[in-house]
Amino acid sequence: MTVWRSRVVREKLSWYYNVMINRVPAKFVIARYVGTEGGLSGLSLEELWNLHRELSKEFSRLFAEAKELRLSLRDVEKLEKPKVSYLDVKIEIARRIMSNCHFCEWRCSVDRLSGRRGFCRLANETYVASYFLHIGEEPPLVPSGTIFYGSCNFRCVFCQNHDISQEHPYSGLKVSAEELAAIQDYLRGEGARNINHVGGEPTPNIYTILSSLKYVKYNVPQLWNSNMYLTEESLELLRDVIDIWLPDFKYGTNTCASRLSLVRDYYDVVARNLKVICSSGDPIIIRHLVMPNHIDCCTERVLTWISENCPTALVNVMDQYRPEYLVLRRPENYREIARRPTREEIERAYEIARRLRIDFEDVS
Ligand code: SF4
């Protein structure tokens, strides 16, 4: 609780804080009360997006009232529920995207609804490897109702969660939207400050996650803990339901990302997505993992980008990198990251953050 004595944290995370203490409704709750009376089945994807844009304007009006503390949870629950909500429109768009999958920038275009699998190895299913109250997250977030989804759309050679992300992606509980909602209610009931969607990677599970929000009973902040390799379309679906963002920003060059996470155009995609979130003023804590021998190419470039494009962010400059997974098994292939960062490297990362006037000390 002492972290909330920091004026910087209170100011930067104020929306999240007010949802956390139930002073205002979470975004997904508001999205249930915005809507239309027409059906969706006859609409093309383009028409659905047009409707989404329209409803987003009504959502923004209510959201602005809630932000100014003029719309409480009780107020919103007194509104009449529409026949088809903004949330329903999002769910239908997500279902269509899945039939030609472009949730992330791999843009596999496979029909996951018919059982085909893309690079993330997932078809029409969501696996929860584990869920619990996590006390190891950043201070403003704990205890965090963390849900670890199986599988991932990255192939990080040093992954700490390689068991669920790469080697046993289907080992958890296979969950429906209703079951995922029950998990969220259980976690909130146990004292979770937020629901923390993580993995593996939550992005391939956007359809199930959005669908679950129809059934969640409690008011609870939704937190997106992700590699942020999602498409602009996915980001548009999530923006009006996620209350706080917890993205990674690891690499300062596409080359480092391609070699160590087997992903293309990483820097461009993540920077593009973060720019959208930062310009919206949403609460955000960016995680940057300091990796050995990657201070100039990654740490310096990422922190510089944040200082220039995302001054509203809190930043966790993370010192806990250790060789894992393929780096541990075949260190000769990854010599430059086959050790922990030195104290000098971590101090240099902190110095860069200080020089750039980044707010990192409360959450690192
Ligand atoms: S989520 Fe990404 S990796 Fe998975 S099928 Fe869709 S586009 Fe491909």
Image (cartoon, rainbow, N blue to C red):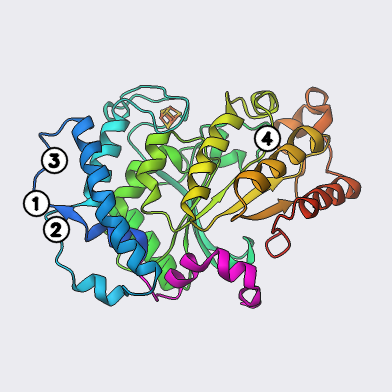
Is 145 one of the magenta-colored residues?
no
Does the CB distance between marks 4 and 2 fall below 8 Å?
no
Between 172 and 198, the residue placed more toward the observer is 198
Tell me the distance, in whole angstroms, between the alpha carbons under discs 3 and 1.
10 Å
Residue occupied by mark 2: 82
Name the element at disc 2: loop
Does the CB distance between marks 1 and 2 fall below 8 Å?
yes
Could you tell which of marks 3 and 4 lies nearer the N-terminus? Answer: 3
Image quadrant containing the C terminus = bottom right
Is 17 one of the magenta-colored residues?
yes
Residue occupied by mark 1: 37
Does the CB distance between marks 3 and 4 fall below 8 Å?
no
Amino acid at circle 3:
Leu
Residue range of the region highlighted in magenta in the rendering:
1-25
Amino acid at circle 2:
Pro
Looking at the rendering, the quadrant in which ligand 1 lies is: top left
Q: Is residue 140 left or right of residue 41?
A: right
